[in-house]
Image: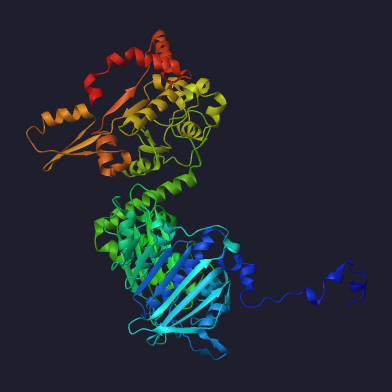
Amino acid sequence: MSDDLFDNAPSGGSDYDSSSIEVLEGLEPVRRRPGMYIGGTDDRALHHLAAEVLDNAMDEAVAGHANRIEMVLEEGNRLTITDNGRGIPVDEHPKFPGKSTLEVILTTLHSGGKFSGKAYATSGGLHGVGVSVVNALSSETRVEVARNKEVFAQSFSKGLPLARIEKIGTTPNRRGTSVTFVPDTEIFGDRQFKPARLFKLARSKAYLFAGVEIRWKCAPSLASDDVPQEATFQFPGGLADHLREEVGTRECVTSEFFSGSQDFPEIDGQQQGRVEWAVAWPLWSDGSTSWYCNTVPTPDGGTHEQGLRAALTKGLRAFGELTGQKKASQINADDVMTGSEIMLSVFIRDPQFQSQTKDRLTSPEAARLVENAVRDHFDHFLADNMERGRALLGAVMERMDERLKRKAEREVKRKTATNAKKLRLPGKLTDCSGDTDKETELFIVEGDSAGGSAKQARDRKTQAILPIRGKILNVASATADKIRANSEIADLSLALGCGTRKDCDPENLRYDRVVIMTDADVDGAHIATLLMTFFFQEMPELVRRGHLYLAQPPLYRLTSGKESRYARDDAHREELEATVFKGKKVEVARFKGLGEMNPGQLRETTMDPQTRSLIRITLPAEHEQRFAVKELVDQLMGRNPEHRFNFIQNRAGEIDRDLIDA
């Protein structure tokens, strides 16, 4: 190597010598760089401290040494977590003369009983940094250990022991470990533990291991309507109980959830762990996913998620082949998983995570173990009840069709259009499945919940669904620039494909009918009015030619014995009670919205051409009468509120007094 490399080096290095090299000892690295160990110093990192201590207690429970855990939140940001497990060893550590094992664990990184697998077959704490990091980042830490009928205690501050471990008494019945800590304000500022978040954490841990009882307590000043002062969690059904609570009253594709558990095969006489799962497919609402490894949440999923995805996807493909659905071979994991409620918990030996915060599981064997364990159970779930299997396959294939359609028809023109211009369709649109001789319809529905129900209820060949977000822009009082910039109006215009205002050509309309389908209440009527105003102003010729309709969803369902009827409004309800149900005891159910109706009810009452009622919205043929309509729209929907006030004042006497009283 040439000396020139050194001779020609830039000057200014005189400040960099051996004294510049710092050696951080003990837990000082944690205090200097907390983000490396808990991901930062925000609320999430603060609550990660609680999770680290709770994970240690859960490891004792999963290993079969504890069956009760207590979490107590006091004022002053003080949290105590206690288990009735074996208790941290308190005798002198052989490698650290004069120090107890307890002190070594609390003050030394990478110390613990989970490296060899002898003390814990499966555990959430693996790196030996959890409780020591909590200690390092707390202004106060106190640990009490009950072992062999004796109680020991030691206190720490910012990672340093305040005194040696001491025996503080005897106890004939108590055993286990109790950790009390107060996060350091030098690290976390004025951030406080959120009772609701800790309450939810404690509850979720109880679901993850059916054999443990978790007790929650908090100071009276920290309790609320959502967080009781005391609670006890124990769920014999495990994840299935949790999923049942999450789904609530929502109707699902299958009335029975796909849930179960399975031990992994032994290798060389050693148990490799187990998996537990619970999956539901709600009909008209978004789903959620919860992934866990050794009771630790892994929000970013990982290899155990991949195993479940593979098991469900391959299982449905095989069931499709069994039932003669050749297109089922095109099902992918997103078709199966999107919109579903999924909970998956695995217990495996020596898991590998992407980081110390354990957000993602990376153990390669987890995918194979989970897939093999779940697949056989899923095959039985589908085949044991063929109707259930067909229902799930049909729902997933509908999602598959939508995905394939979006991919293949980014720019498409329906045969009703005469020009060669292709339209880029909005992502929210669920279009008809293909060309057909039958008349096609676009249903404009309010909200994703109603949209999901309508997708299940529709005839896929002839009926398209476009959800909108609540009340669209009032075009009668908006500027042209504001109308052009509105995403909901842009999506609607693209879906229809016929242009607006002077460029509106009904010959290019992509559907034979456009149906406004909103809730049968005041808000629904307002949204329908805004949409009618939009069509009147932006696409008047479309309205004049009779392409626009109002759906008539029912407001009530009346039931007496085995007979049920639907009522459009209060007047229709009274009519049915006076005729069909005269003299009978009637149960009346009121629909709060389209999203409250299951797809079968929505199809029967509002979407099936054989049983529904539609109102056609038209304009007078005579120009003079059309001008009067425009004047009325301007009065009611225009920019001047005085016109609306005068209209109401002038016509208040025309309102039915009985309607006001109602």
Assign the C terminus to one quadrant of the image.
top left
| Rendered image quadrant of residue 37 | bottom right
| Rendered image quadrant of residue 1 | bottom right
Taking 630 as reference, is 559 left or right? left
Residue placed at 31% from the left, 63% from the top? 240
Residue placed at 44% from the left, 34% from the top? 414
Task: Please tell me which residue lies in front, 177 or 121.
Answer: 177
Q: Is residue 203 above or below residue 372?
A: above
Taking 42 as reference, is 568 left or right? left
Residue placed at 43% from the left, 63% from the top? 74
Q: Can residue 613 be seen?
A: yes
Taking 482 as reference, is 580 left or right? left
Residue 544 is situated, as x and y percent measured from the top left of the image, at: 39, 19
Residue 580 is situated, as x and y percent measured from the top left of the image, at: 11, 32
Task: Please tell me which residue lies in front, 491 or 628.
Answer: 628
Q: Can residue 435 be seen?
A: no
Residue 460 is situated, as x and y percent measured from the top left of the image, at: 35, 42
User: Residue lying farthest left?
Assistant: 583
